[in-house]
Structure formats: structure tokens, C-alpha cells
Image (spheres, helix red, strand yellow):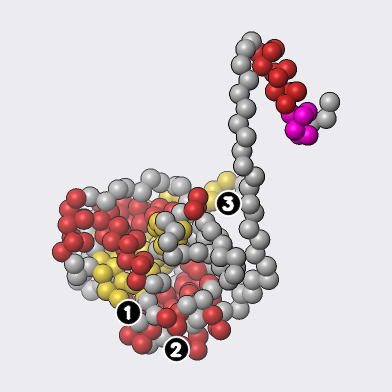
């Protein structure tokens, strides 16, 4: 905890295309991000909600951190509207194409620059990549304890207590702070932005942009050329149009019509 200051929580978020709007560029074989409706990565929104609940119970400062183009300000502004205190966006063209390895490195270096943190919250994974690597990678770079895939969290006697999802149930873990926790998707209901939060955004001064040079990040450790992930092939599945058919009448009659249609369409054999 910062000397003489409130409990400090860092929440790492990413702006992602809405799940129902995911599109792949046929030429670059990468996700389209321009002109596609976006949102805060849903598990990251769950992580932010946990941070806000902690702040509801005790004096705390919430700093939201993201890495990406300046369009990510949209999600940072929403985070402020929900109740976060301020936000940092690491934005630099040399970060383009970074996979989870340079992303974890860049974010951990940015967290070191922010300093004075007690707890780092991340979503379990992102809906546009689903690797779950970045949170643990940050903890590794910072050499701090981590608890992954949590669905409940509390601060007890200066330690983090969290319920972790396991294959055959759940486990309760405890970690000394500072530590990092990754949060399960859907484990809570993120709150909506408030009027007072929106006013704070409009007044400005709550979001700062840092470049790699500002943070002191080595350009030779980030970006596409320093990303070990290789995408061999990406296929886009084009769903056939749906032909809706309704069957009316008494149950035996309707079921008979359904079975006949399924046979005619080749779904089942007679």
C-alpha cells in the first residue's frame, strides 16, 4: 500500500470487438478492429467490478490500465464512468502486432512506472484471443504471487482471500500483497456508468497516454517481430442462411410435418 495513501488497485483491461461482431480480414487473416463495434473485454469488466466492490467497502484508488490504440479511450472512459479513479493507456505504433509475450512485458513495465500498487486484477482471458497468458505473464515479470480463475475475492488482515475454480469444484487460496488475480467471466454483474462518473470523464484529466519511451520499454522486446506466436492458418466459417419453417396444428400433425421436412432436407433418414 502506498505510504499514507489509500489501498491501490490496478485493473488491466482490453477493448475487444463484440463477440457477435467478430470479423476476420480475408487478406491479413487478422481480426478487424476498425469500424467494428467494441466493448470492454467481458472478463475484464468482471475484474473491474470486483475492484469497485472493494472500493465500496474501504478507502481505495482504482487505476485502469490498457495497451492499444487511442480508440481504447472509449473503454477507459467507461471504466471511469463506472467508478475507477484514473486510467493509463500505453499507446505506441511499435507495439503493433504484439502477442501475449511482449504484451505482458510492456504492461509489467508500465505497472512498475505507476508503482505503489497492492492488488492487480485481470480478466481470465480475452474474447478475441482466449489464451489466458497475459495476467500470469505480468505476475511473472513482477515476481509477485498470483491466483488465477477466481470467482470470489476479499481482503482479510492485509491478505487476499479468493475462491479459485478447479476442474472438480473450487478451492480457497490466500496470497500476501502485492499480488495479481485473474477473474472468471460472468462471476458478477458489472455496474453501469453513473452520471457523476460521466461528468468526471467530460471534465478531463483522468486518462493519460504513455508511449514506450515514456515508460522506458525496449523496442526490441515488443511488437510483431518480437512475438513468438505463429498463426499458420485462419479459417472463416460462413454460416448458411436460416430457412425458418413453422408447423401448426395438433401435436401429432405438427410432429409429422416436422419429421417429413427433416427427411426432405437430408437431416435424418426415413
Q: Which of marks 3 and 1 is nearer the N terminus?
A: 3
Q: Which of 180 and 160 is in front in this view?
A: 180
Q: Residue 166 carries which label?
A: 3
Quadrant for the N terminus, please: bottom left
Q: How far apart are marks 2 and 1 (CA)?
A: 14 Å
Q: How far apart are marks 3 and 2 (CA)?
A: 37 Å
From the top left corner, tell me how far across and down residue 32 is, in percent: 50, 64
Mark 3 neighbour class, 10 Å CA radius: few under 14, some 14 to 19, many 20 or more = few
Q: Distance between the residues labelled 3 and 1?
A: 37 Å
Give me the residue at 27% from left, 51% from top. Answer: 193
Quadrant for the C terminus, please: top right
Q: Is residue 19 above or below residue 256?
A: below
Q: Is mark 2 on a helix, strand or loop?
A: loop
Q: Earlier in the sequence, mark 3 or mark 2?
A: 3
Can residue 99 be seen in the rendering of this structure?
yes
Q: Which mark is residue 218?
A: 2
Mark 1 neighbour class, 10 Å CA radius: few under 14, some 14 to 19, many 20 or more = some
Q: Earlier in the sequence, mark 2 or mark 1?
A: 1
Q: Which mark is residue 69?
A: none
Please report the bounds of the magenta region as a residue range: 262-267
From the top left corner, tell me how far across and down residue 269 is, in percent: 83, 30
From the top left corner, tell me how far across and down residue 118 is, in percent: 34, 68
Give me the residue at 47% from left, 71% from top. Answer: 139
Residue 262 falls left or right of residue 166:
right
Give me the residue at 60% from left, 31% from top. Answer: 244
Would you name the residue on which mark 1 appears? 210
From the top left corner, tell me how far across and down residue 159 is, in percent: 37, 61
Q: What element carries label 3?
A: strand
Q: Nearer the viewer, residue 59 or 89?
A: 89
Foreground disc of the pair 3, 2 = 2
**Residue 117 magenta-highlighted:** no
Can residue 173 be seen in the rendering of this structure?
no
Amino acid at each position: 500500500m502506498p505510504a499514507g495513501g489509500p489501498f491501490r488497485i490496478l485493473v488491466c483491461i482490453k477493448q475487444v470487438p463484440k463477440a457477435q461482431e467478430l470479423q476476420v480480414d480475408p487478406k491479413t487473416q487478422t481480426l478487424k478492429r476498425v469500424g467494428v463495434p467494441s466493448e470492454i473485454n467481458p472478463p475484464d469488466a468482471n475484474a473491474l467490478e470486483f475492484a469497485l466492490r472493494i472500493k465500496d467497502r474501504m478507502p481505495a484508488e482504482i487505476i485502469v490500465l490498457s495497451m492499444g490504440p487511442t480508440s481504447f479511450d472509449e473503454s477507459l472512459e467507461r471504466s471511469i464512468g463506472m467508478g475507477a479513479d484514473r486510467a493509463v493507456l500505453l499507446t505506441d505504433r511499435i507495439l503493433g502486432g504484439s502477442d501475449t509475450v511482449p504484451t505482458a512485458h510492456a504492461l509489467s513495465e508500465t505497472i512498475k512506472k505507476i508503482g505503489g500498487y497492492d492488488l492487480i486484477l485481470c480478466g481470465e482471458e480475452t474474447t478475441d484471443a482466449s489464451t489466458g497468458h497475459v495476467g500470469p505473464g505480468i505476475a511473472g515479470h513482477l515476481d509477485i504471487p498470483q491466483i488465477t480463475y477466481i470467482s470470489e475475492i476479499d481482503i482479510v488482515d492485509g491478505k487476499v482471500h479468493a475462491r479459485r475454480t478447479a476442474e472438480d469444484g473450487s478451492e480457497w487460496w490466500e496470497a500476501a500483497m502485492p499480488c495479481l488475480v485473474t477473474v472468471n467471466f460472468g462471476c458478477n454483474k458489472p455496474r453501469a456508468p453513473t452520471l457523476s462518473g460521466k461528468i468526471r470523464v467530460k471534465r478531463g484529466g483522468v486518462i493519460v497516454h504513455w508511449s514506450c519511451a515514456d515508460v522506458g520499454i525496449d523496442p526490441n522486446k515488443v511488437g510483431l517481430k518480437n512475438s513468438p506466436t505463429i498463426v499458420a492458418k485462419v479459417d472463416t466459417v460462413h454460416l448458411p442462411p436460416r430457412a425458418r419453417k413453422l408447423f401448426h396444428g395438433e401435436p401429432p400433425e405438427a410432429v409429422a410435418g416436422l419429421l417429413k421436412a427433416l427427411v426432405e432436407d437430408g437431416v435424418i433418414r426415413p
